[in-house]
Image (cartoon, helix red, strand yellow):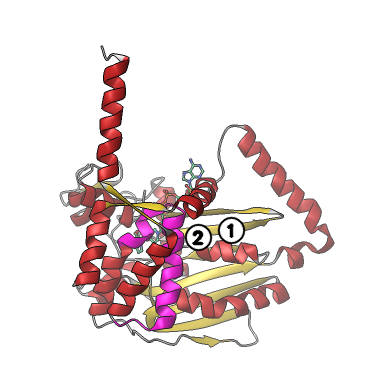
Amino acid sequence: MDSAGNRADRERREHLLAALETVKLSLSDVRFVTQRILSKYGLAPAHVDALADLIVAAERDECASHGVYRLAGLVRTIKSGKLNLAAEPSVQIDETSIIRVDAQLGFSPLAFKMGQIALAQKAKTHGLAAMAINRCFHFTALWPEVEALAEDGLVSLSLTPSHSWVAPAGGTAPLLGTNPFAFGWPRPNKEPYVFDFATSVVAGGEVELHRQRNHPIPVGWAIDPEGKPTQSAASAMIGTLLTFGGHKGSALSTMIELMAGPLIGDLMSTESLTYDNGVGAAPCHGELVLALSPDVFLGHKKREYFESAERLFSLILAQGARLPSQRRFQARLRSVSDGVTITRIQHDILTDLLEA
Ligand code: NDP
Ligand code: PYC
């Protein structure tokens, strides 16, 4: 049996080891390093700023799979020769409620930013509007987009394919992307209700982080190249990821392929991977964002029905469940005051990128 003294000793040792494996950074350090690395490899300033906003936001909200870990892949994308480093996204607005943004083979965040105001205006005029972003290199989480639209009073959905790393339910070979899906609902005087998840069991980035740390992955995330369940993140990466919820996640993922691919005249995940041609750049395809105005849908009844929505949130919480993004908003408060922690592995990769 462990004595209290031994236990305290062991806990102190474990705490110390964990501290040695991590590095503490302020949010302004994260921004500085991100901007330095992206600028050093030649990305135009407007893109550097748009990417830095998202990478800092991901670290701030403790979403490691889309934070500084992405920088190595972004540098690979920049070096691939496929990315337009100084792309100036063009925004096309016509009499329909569809905003079309051609990212001109640049990264997606600037394209989203440039179409966002027109999307919001169209939604506030017609009740429902869509933004089709085409020809973008996409590496980001989607919650910053739906959160920004919720802050503007809009309900929204955002969908995008990726590279084909995921088997359809019942299959064993990669065909679908990790295809994330995000939803935002504005809440008066509160943080919005936001969820954002991959339609694979977890984001591909999460599997890669497990591989980097040499941690096993849970059963059910992936199968190896022979189609057998695997707990090795390295085998998963050369094998196939699985969809969440079996056939349900598989159908949602297929819907995302269709709506954010052929419907907007862009590539699906298999085509994005073919286009990549083994370079290992970020996926290149489109994104679809839908925005809905509760003011137009509900008019003077908005207050009443938004109170119904609040009752639903309260009843969820009353069962001891939590709302999606609750963890993220709590992490945000902590990070703003205390800074963030990255792994030493990540720190060393950033140092190499800065010094290369
Ligand atoms: P998770 O499986 O961790 O799911 C994330 C969502 O579920 C968050 O909204 C999270 O809120 C919420 N959540 C988690 N646990 C609970 C719980 N117990 N109760 C209620 N809500 C919960 O994330 P994924 O690995 O699927 O995706 C991570 C990110 O990867 C996403 O942001 C996604 O956009 C991104 N991604 C991007 C891709 C791209 O091509 N651009 C491809 C694939 C993924 P909270 O954050 O508060 O925990
Ligand atoms: O984590 O699967 C992922 C991913 C793909 C593109 C950006 N993130």
The answer to whether residue 113 shows anywhere in this view is yes
Q: Residue 121, labelled with which disc?
A: none
- Answer with mark 2 or mark 1, whichever residue precedes in sequence: 2
Q: Secondary structure at mark 1?
A: strand
The answer to whether residue 261 shows anywhere in this view is no
Residue under circle 2?
143
**Residue 10 rendering spot, x and y as whole percentages:** 26, 26
Residue lying at the far right in this picture: please name it.
300
> Residue at 20% across / 73% down in the picture?
279
User: In the picture shown, does residue 99 fall above or below 197?
Assistant: below
**Residue 31 rendering spot, x and y as whole percentages:** 40, 67
Mark 2 vs 1: CB contact within 8 A: yes
Between 350 and 128, the residue placed more toward the observer is 350
> Residue at 47% across / 68% down in the picture?
259
Q: Where does the magenta region start and end? A: 42-69
Inspect the magenta stretch and tell me whether residue 44 lies in it: yes
Residue lying at the far left in this picture: please name it.
226
Position of 223 with respect to 185 (left or right) is left
Position of 281 with respect to 34 (left or right) is left
Q: Secondary structure at mark 2?
A: helix
Q: Amino acid at mark 1?
A: Gly
> Residue at 72% across / 55% down in the picture?
188
Question: Counting other residues with Cα less than 10 Å from the Cα at mark 2, is it few (<14), some (14-19), or many (20 or more)?
Answer: many
Say if disc 2 is inside 8 Å of ligand 1. yes
> Residue at 20% across / 71% down in the picture?
355
Question: Which image quadrant for residue 166?
Answer: bottom left
Residue under circle 1?
184
Q: Amino acid at mark 2?
A: Trp
Q: Which corner quadrant holds the N terminus?
A: top left
Q: State whether the magenta stretch is mostly helix, strand or loop.
A: helix
